[in-house]
Amino acid sequence: MGFETFVARRYLRSPRKDRSISVITKISVIGVAIGVMALIVALSVMNGFEKDLKGALQRVNGDLTVYSLSPNGLRWQDDNPLLTRIKETVPISAYAPFTHHQAFIMGKHKPMLTLIKGIDVNLEAGVAPINFFVRTDSFESKRDNSLVDNANRPEIEEILGKLAPHYETADGQQQGSVRKKVYGIIIGSQLAKELGVDIGDWVTIMSLEARITPMGDMPRAKRFRIVGFYESGLPTADEFFSVIDIKVAQTVFKMGNQISGLTLSVENRNKADQYKEALQKTIGFPYIINTWIDQNRNLFAMFELEKFGLAVILTMIILIAAFNIISSLIMLVIEKNKDIAILKAMGAKDQSIRRIFMMQGIIIGLTGTIIGEILGLLICWVLRNYDVIDIPPGVYVGNRISVDVQIWQISLIAAVSFLICFVVTIFPSRKASKLDPVQGLRNE
């Protein structure tokens, strides 16, 4: 290592040192740092968004959903034999029946298409945090996400109780105060915005199935009063979703005591796929079982593809910086042509010369990588703890940009960055080691 130390000191003290080499070296360090920083921040934000979205989808859809393929649905009763077989097959912690219906909903503005879900208020909270999704304030205000696991909200319990038919006092024009039977509905926050309605307003639900009347086929219609907003943070749900009482849904849509399916909450969510296979073998046709992952598999595949493409694009920044390292080392070789020739004439081996320039490139790459890692983690910390970017209510699962820093990604980014910087030093270091000392001293 004596030659390496000698050349390093000579290079640092050289009065003929070219400023352009120093500038290119600094640019290389900055380029590597920016690439590493951008890659860490981008992937961490994508991870956070994916984590929030998966959590919201899991809460909306439930762990397992059992659908009936029968046109008339599933006949439901408290001691249903299907439920007994399910409990004997998989360890479920809660269940809730539901009905699904497509209908038109009319408010103050144009009619919209909505997916109506009939729920059992007493059972739904066991499979989905309905108390968290229901809002009592305007959908223009932000929500406290710390309440996601808090089911003890009396005001929400009161709203859910109003879904069932109940009587309210209204002022009559001629007879004074009268009691009127009211059916409650909870509609998506974005759907409410499109309809131009607020809590307390009336909407009309029109079934897509017609009924025969003396005047011909007429759609079945029912007036509901809005008692709350539904906001999950998922555009697909908040723009089309409506919730009513399951008994009201069975009456309006002529289902009798039939239901569309069951939502199940299992004790171990990580084994949802195993439970699905076991249930499919046990209950079989005419039932189909889906997990919350099955219902959103294409969406998750899109996320993985986007993260991969984003990582490839941002890695190009590191590659561009790596080419600057090549430039700075080649210029260093040209500047130190005479010094290299003298050392080789004194007996320095090619391996020693090559090691010197490889060490120079490694120091540049390592410095840029460390700075990029520190800056990337610092930006992630700021995004996680401060409202740097203002997110309008209702357009995102959370109220601020979510950041999920994964250690294996940080380590992989550092390793790839260091490897790229190491590889690009091979060519200029070989060029320096192959320098002919006679050619280097010919003009001296």
Image: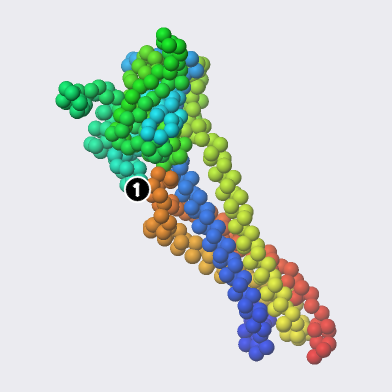
x 83%, y 87%: residue: 442
Q: Nearer the viewer, residue 339 or 371?
A: 371
The residue positioned 29% from the left and 24% from the top of the image is 183
Q: Which residue is depicted at the point 43% across and 11% down? A: 215
- Residue furthest to the front: 174
- Element assignment for label 1: loop
Q: How is the image coloured?
A: rainbow
Name the residue carrying label 1.
Answer: 142
Q: Is residue 278 above or below residue 18?
A: above
Which residue reaches farthest left?
176
Q: Is residue 122 above or below residue 33?
A: above
Left or right: residue 2 versus residue 300 is right
**Type of amino acid at the residue the image marks with label 1:** Lys
Q: Outermost residue, top direction? A: 214
Rendered location of residue 76, percent (x, y): 37, 16
Residue drawn at (43%, 26%) of the image: 104
Q: Which image quarter holds the C terminus?
A: bottom right
- In this picture, residue 41 sits left or right of residue 144: right
The x, y position of residue 9, in whole percent, is 63, 84
Q: Position of residue 214 (x, y in %)?
A: 41, 8
Label count reads 1
Residue 163 appears anywhere in the view: yes
Where is residue 301? Give x, y as percent.
Answer: 57, 40
- Label 1 CA crowd tier, 10 Å (few <14, some 14–19, many 20+): some
Q: Quadrant of residue 226?
A: top left
Is residue 64 visible in this depiction of the protein? no
Q: Quadrant of residue 36?
A: bottom right
Identify the image quadrant of the N terminus: bottom right
